[in-house]
Amino acid sequence: MNIVTFCNIDESLIDNKHKVEHFDSSVSEKADIAILDINSIFDFEENKHEVCKEKFVSIAVIDDDSDYDAFKNFGIDAWIQGEDIQDINGIINLVEKRFLS
């Protein structure tokens, strides 16, 4: 899976079977999964068609309920609480099986 992050995330939390690139650096392959947070929602919205495959899944990292309220209008596929970020592989594996197979 190709993953593009629009926010700062510790890449060591993501299984090394995935290729992880950050949006700010040059993206060599379009993403199957995009990871974003409330601070990067507009970068994501403006650039998702350029850096993501036609069929991709978005995962939002949220810190509180107000983040969720902001994201619900953007068609985000999955959410994870920032405090649970160490569990992100579980969500990645789930969306990989459920949405991208």
Image (cartoon, rainbow, N blue to C red):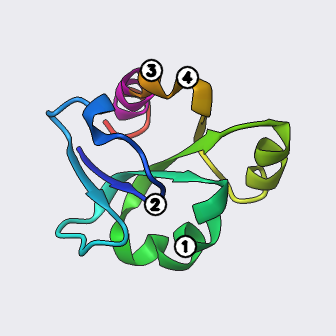
**SS for callout 4:** helix
Q: Is residue 84 left or right of residue 1?
A: right
Q: Position of residue 88 (x, y in %)?
A: 43, 28
The disc label shown at residue 83, or none: none
Which residue in the structure is indicated by mark 4?
Answer: 84
Which residue in the structure is indicated by mark 1?
Answer: 43
Q: Position of residue 34 (x, y in %)?
A: 43, 53
Whole-number angstrom distance, CA of label 2 to CA of label 1 = 7 Å
Q: Few, some or many C-alpha atoms within 10 Å of disc 2 (few <14, some 14-19, many ≥20)?
A: many
**SS for callout 1:** helix
Which residue in the structure is indicated by mark 3?
Answer: 87
Give amino acid for label 4: Asp
The reply to whether callout 4 and callout 2 are in contact (CB within 8 Å) is no
The reply to whether callout 1 and callout 3 are in contact (CB within 8 Å) is no
- The front one of 48 and 43 is 43
Whole-number angstrom distance, CA of label 2 to CA of label 3 = 18 Å
Give the quadrant of the N terminus.
top left
Which residue in the structure is indicated by mark 2?
Answer: 6
